Amino acid sequence: MNPRLLPALLAFAWIVCSQPVAAGQGDGRRLASAIIEGNIDAVETLLDKGVDVNALLVEGLWALDVARVCGWKSIEKLLLERGAKKANAKIFPPGTLAPELADLYLSNDIAKGSPGFAVIVSRNGKELFCRGYGLARVKEGVVAGPGTPFRIGSVTKQFTSAAILKLQEEGKLSVSDRLSKFFPGFPRGGEVTLHHLLSHTSGIHSYTSAPGFLKGVTKPVKAARLVEQITKAPFDFGPGERFKYSNSGYFLLGLIVEKVSGRSYAEYLEEKFFRPLGMKKTGLHRRGFEPGGEALGYTRSGKGFERAVNWDMSWAGGAGALYSTVRDLDRWNEGLFALKVLNKKSLELALTPVKPPGGGLEGSKVSYAYGWMIQSHRGLRAVAHSGGLHGFQSYLARYPEQKLTVAVLANAEFSPGAKARVLAELWLSTVMEPRLEREEKKGIAGKNYEDYAGRYDYGSGVMTVEREGDRLFAQLGLQPRFEIFSAGGDEFFWKVVEARVKFERDNSGKVTRILHTQGGSVIKAPRLTRQVVVKVDPAIYDAYVGRYDYGSGQTLTVTRDGGKLMAKMTAQPKLQLLPRSKKDFFFKVVNAEITFVRGPGGEVTGVEHLQGGKTIKAPRLR
């Protein structure tokens, strides 16, 4: 639901070992986690800092065992080069040791006294692995576990979708019905269908992206007021023209469930789904009626973790207001795919990817259906969805042909999608396609590297590629900067994560975009050519320092940090502005521009903010 967290399936899963490593009890877990993740850079760093390549990670398990079981031949080669003894290693059948490796991997992520997460892996309803790590409530010291309720954010959408399809089975509506049938007078409501809402192809602007949205989320809101806000926003495109994730569509669908069923959204889900499936710890999160023992949400700060913005979930509705546990989500998946939730025809419809004329999910090979994302994971079909709120992240996946469910619920930033993929690989590696080996192409370092340097638009952020001598570095948004290595031609890979990029050229040989492959997805990121940094005297920045009013309580605060100009939007991180001219600037990590406007007397009176094809004029606050 958090507009900065939608959707998390395409987010990067960087795993970094940046802190000094001293010999000690945690070394084995750190090394095991880096191997399981496939982070060869972290493995190398740990070995460089003195971790014993021949130390037992846990009883009877060596580093070489882990690399072999996980199928990381490049890491196995590195360990042998660093002195790993073949005589120590055992022959384990592929796919074995999954619970032991899962615990090694997950326990490495949790510091004492920190928030945490709960996970489950099951097949055919039988639990293969189900544990909690860290704390559900930090101050009280309450541990997180399989029965801990977490807010699940946008994983809610599949429940809303299922409710609409159940009502269709009951003959009470059709996905081809027009929005105007349920909301008379809604702008262009005669063009928008429930199909468009379910598949994020309606063009209705997402209300969570509106300026000032975060200002009121801690207090209750009436649904009618939110609907009014949604109706006032211009459409992003014509209904059915293309895909764009919109919380507005699912908020409206939740209200349609109420209008058609004659029950509240919570009552309908309880009667049709939760009670029949035995989901006793799942429901609509309401202020004053919070589930017992629920996890509280936290966010990272300079001092560790602090309480996150506490949403009143009336702002989320059918788009993201549910809470659940990993065990309940497993019951849901088992019931859904056993046709206990929807009939076969409805389930097939729910999981059929929608292909609008304008393209799929933000240029990716991942496809969106009705509240579920359909993707490929090393050759296997995966049906999944992620969720994000301030202080909460969630991920629920099903591998239908293997009848495997993986769920991860977290109450801080712990990359549940990345964790779920690693867990799935531990249990399904024998039926997955082989891993792509990451061997650096020798003898071509630095060749044509100047062609690649630049900025590439990933939609949710900007990838900056920079050359330093015969080395190439890449940084996406506010994530850490890492070196990428040549795989030959125009293709490069990361050592810290299983991902690679191919730089595509036009007919003249100029690099025009990136094809980024990671986790079964391909992101097409065009090169940004308009935004070129020019040299200016940093002294001019002083005239721009101040606060600018974006309306609805949102302000942009511009500060000078030595020779840098920085800008911070309300409730968002401080970002660097780079000069395109003396008055025109662009954000380093976001595809957005700022022009400082001067009045008749030459004094700066405001800014014009261009982003996503829209311009916001914000006067300076005195």
Image (spheres, rainbow, N blue to C red):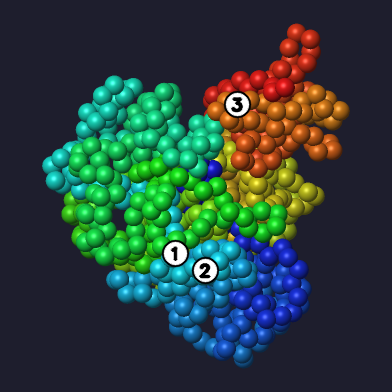
Work out whether 352 lies above or below 332.
above
Other-residue count near label 1 (Cα within 10 Å), few / some / many at <14 / 14–19 / ≥20: some
Q: Do the CB atoms of the residues marked 3 and 2 lie less than 8 Å apart?
A: no
- Foreground residue, 558 or 508? 558
Tell me the quarter of the image containing the C terminus.
Answer: top right
Could you tell whether 109 is left or right of 46 in the image? left
Q: Do the CB atoms of the residues marked 1 and 2 lie less than 8 Å apart?
A: yes
| Mark 1 element type | loop
Return the mark for residue 550.
Answer: 3
Sequence-first disc among 3 and 2? 2
Q: x, y (%) of residue 500?
A: 58, 54
Give the amino acid type for the residue marked by disc 3 in the picture: Tyr
Residue furthest top as drawn: 600
- Determine the residue positioned at 43% across, 55% down: 151
Return the mark for residue 142.
Answer: 2
Give the amino acid type for the residue marked by disc 1 in the picture: Gly
Work out whether 523 lies above or below 126.
above
**Where does label 1 land, which residue?**
293
**Residue 87 in sight from this viewpoint:** yes
- Determine the residue positioned at 41% across, 23% down: 232
